[in-house]
Image (cartoon, rainbow, N blue to C red):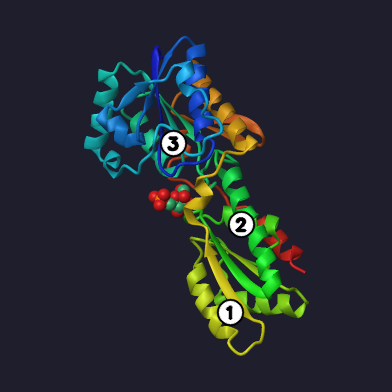
Amino acid sequence: MTTIRRIAILTSGGDAPGMNAAIRSAARSAVSHGWEAYGVRRGFAGLMAGDFKALGPRDVGGVLQQGGTFLGSARAPEFKTAEGQQKAVEALSAAGIDAVVVIGGNGSQTGAHALSKHGIPVAGIASTIDNDLAGSDITIGVDTALNIALEAIDRLKVTASSHQRAFLVEVMGRDCGYLALMAGIAGGAESICIPEIPTTPEQVAAELDDAFQRGKTHGLIVVAEGAAHDATALAAYLVEHGKHRPGYEVRSSILGHVQRGGIPTASDRILGARLAAHAVDCLARGQVNVLAGMVANQVTATPLAEVAGKHKPFPSDLFDLAKTLVR
Ligand code: F6P
């Protein structure tokens, strides 16, 4: 078992609200084990460049309420190459760093797994607004992103009702429909379009027609960015479809990165704190190359080999629930 004296902490991939709580928790948990903590600027890009800064307990103060990641993040394609990984290994050795904590989603944990294969003890922390990562029921950032989407939906419903309009709201999630499905259930959508359960434009139009016929004054359609037909394509179809129907107007809003920039909710801060402390504890007891996640409401450690490149099963029963609730 490697003796750990100094760890590096990095955030990688798309930033997620609550990452700062995780950095703070990892740094202070490291100190509680008698170790030194270093932050890595700009994720794996900074790791390859040896861009480290010491993170004492005071350096991670005042960050809980900030969205994003104060360490910076990046997409670093070079880290996928053997040369890139070798640069990182050399930079870690030069800085005397014994282990690395990687806070991020799918791509980041695949990077963490690659690093571990070079003999570096690694612990991952499940963090992505997409909630598509295997090894954790919920990931840091999802709750905040979902609440931002929901606030937008609630507001759009108000103006939709005033004008008897249909509104398409496109939410993030890459190729996962989790955020769209949950926002649709929480926001009372008339139709939900997600990649996992494809919906045709004709089906969406039929759901909208039904809603207006049942006396609704608005039609809310939540669309995942990865759905077979995005909000722009669906809007074009619906405008054409509703051309000769009085009162049938369509507008669309693409929320995009707005969902990533929010103030972290209490839930995301607590999740960040718990998962990061668990990741550091795992390293301390030699349980390395694992992802700290939350499964069945318990903090867990899943081997990175079972996480890298994998997606967790989609809760399709909740899609059925959404359908039941549209009346
Ligand atoms: O993975 C998080 C995420 O926000 C996805 O939902 C989205 O598809 C992607 O990142 C956007 O990436 P970028 O920030 O590089 O534009």
Residue at the spot x=37%, y=37% of the render?
A: 111
Residue type at tag 2: Ala
Q: In the displayed image of the protein, which residue is found farthest to the bottom? A: 244
Q: Is mark 1 on a helix, strand or loop?
A: helix
Labels 3, 2: front one:
2
**Which quadrant is the C terminus positioned in?**
bottom right
Q: Nearer the viewer, residue 157 or 25?
A: 157
Would you name the residue on which mark 2 appears?
152
Residue type at tag 3: Ala
Is residue 229 shown to the viewer in this render? no
Name the disc covering residue 118, or none: none
Would you name the residue on which mark 3 appears?
305
Residue type at tag 1: Glu
Q: Residues within 10 Å of mark 3 (few under 14, many from 20)?
A: some
Would you name the residue on which mark 1 appears?
202
Q: In this view, does 263 lie above or below 176?
A: above
Q: What element carries label 2?
A: helix
The answer to which of marks 2 and 1 sits earlier in the sequence is 2
Q: Would you identify the image quadrant in which residue 119 lies?
A: top left
Q: Nearer the viewer, residue 179 or 71?
A: 71
The answer to which of marks 3 and 1 sits earlier in the sequence is 1
